[in-house]
Amino acid sequence: MRILKSLFNFYINSSIHVALAVYALTWITLLELGLKYDEVVLYFMFYATITGYNFVKYFGIAKFRHRRLAKWLRLIQVLSFVCFLFMCFYAYQLQIKTLWVIVFFAVVTFFYAIPFFKKGQYTLRNINGVKVYVIALVWSGATVFIPLINIEYELSTDVLLLGTQRFLYVLVLMIPFEIRDLKFDDSKLKTIPQSIGVNQTKTLGIFMLLICSALEFFKDDLISSSIITLLLITILTGGFVIFSRVEQGKYYSSFWVEALPIFWLVLLLILI
């Protein structure tokens, strides 16, 4: 049992779970637009997410040599390096213009973790009220526009609506994390729960989910399977937002909430 728990914690802490969520959202984009499975883009997104997230999460920790951290951190560093190599392998197969877009998101990710100035403390993560919007921008851009740019897909109204939906949905996914982190976040960060309170944040999240669902009906191509899965995942996500607490279970956000895009993909594959 202890071994299984350690493996599960490694699965979460090494960003494999969040990488599967990004992979799922990217595949959902392809499915909703009737496009074929793109192994190069999807695998690139998976390995790039592990590389980027572990860089952001462990950049500061890696400076320390505490023995308790050493073993699992070394394993994550090895995994991250292997994933970086795979990321480069798949990046080599992408279009040049796709790589330029990826460079933009890579720079944003870099400055999310690294101060703008050598002796400064300001990162995108630490700027008041910016953190969740940066994450939503990167996730929506990466999971919607990168796969489409790579195949030169037309930037239609449906694509812009899909990008807006994805941005709103990722913002909502961040709400349970923001509520959980209320006890840790510096008050100067001005996160959404810090600014308007927990209950109002939940109300805002439900409102954004309603907008996200309503936008589906403004698309030119209405697909029943996409509508049904979106409505189901909206209800499920809304439930997780409503039941979010400051004192929540260890895996409430880090596993269950981040598993929602994976569940969304499974539903869509069943109904499509």
Image (cartoon, helix red, strand yellow):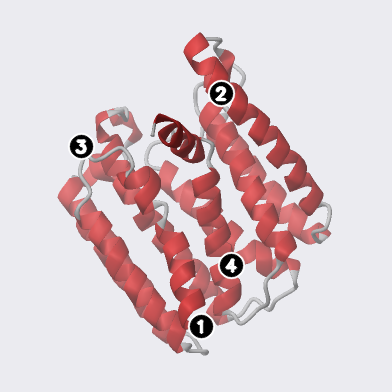
- Count residues near mark 2 (Cα–Cα under 10 Å), then give few for <14, some for 14-19, many for 20+: some
Rendering quarter of residue 54: top right
Q: Residue at x 64, y 76 (%)?
A: 155
- Count residues near mark 1 (Cα–Cα under 10 Å), then give few for <14, some for 14-19, many for 20+: few
Amino acid type, mark 1: Ile
- Count residues near mark 3 (Cα–Cα under 10 Å), then give few for <14, some for 14-19, many for 20+: few
Asked if 121 appears above or below 9 in the picture, the reply is: above
Q: Where residue 272 is drawn, which disc sits there?
A: 1
Q: CA distance from mark 3 to mark 1?
A: 38 Å
Residue 105 shows in the view: no
Q: Nearer the viewer, mark 4 or mark 2?
A: 2
Q: CA distance from mark 1 to mark 2?
A: 41 Å
Q: Earlier in the sequence, mark 3 or mark 2?
A: 2
Q: Earlier in the sequence, mark 3 or mark 4?
A: 4
Q: Which residue is mark 2?
A: 73
Q: Earlier in the sequence, mark 4 or mark 2?
A: 4
Disc 1 element:
loop
Rendered location of residue 160, percent (x, y): 54, 73
Disc 4 element:
helix
Q: Which residue is mark 4?
A: 27
Amino acid type, mark 2: Leu
Rendered location of residue 57, percent (x, y): 51, 31
Q: CA distance from mark 4 to mark 1?
A: 13 Å
Q: Residue at x 78, y 45 (%)?
A: 88
Q: CA distance from mark 3 to mark 4?
A: 33 Å
Amino acid type, mark 4: Trp
Q: Which residue is mark 3?
A: 247
Q: Earlier in the sequence, mark 3 or mark 1?
A: 3
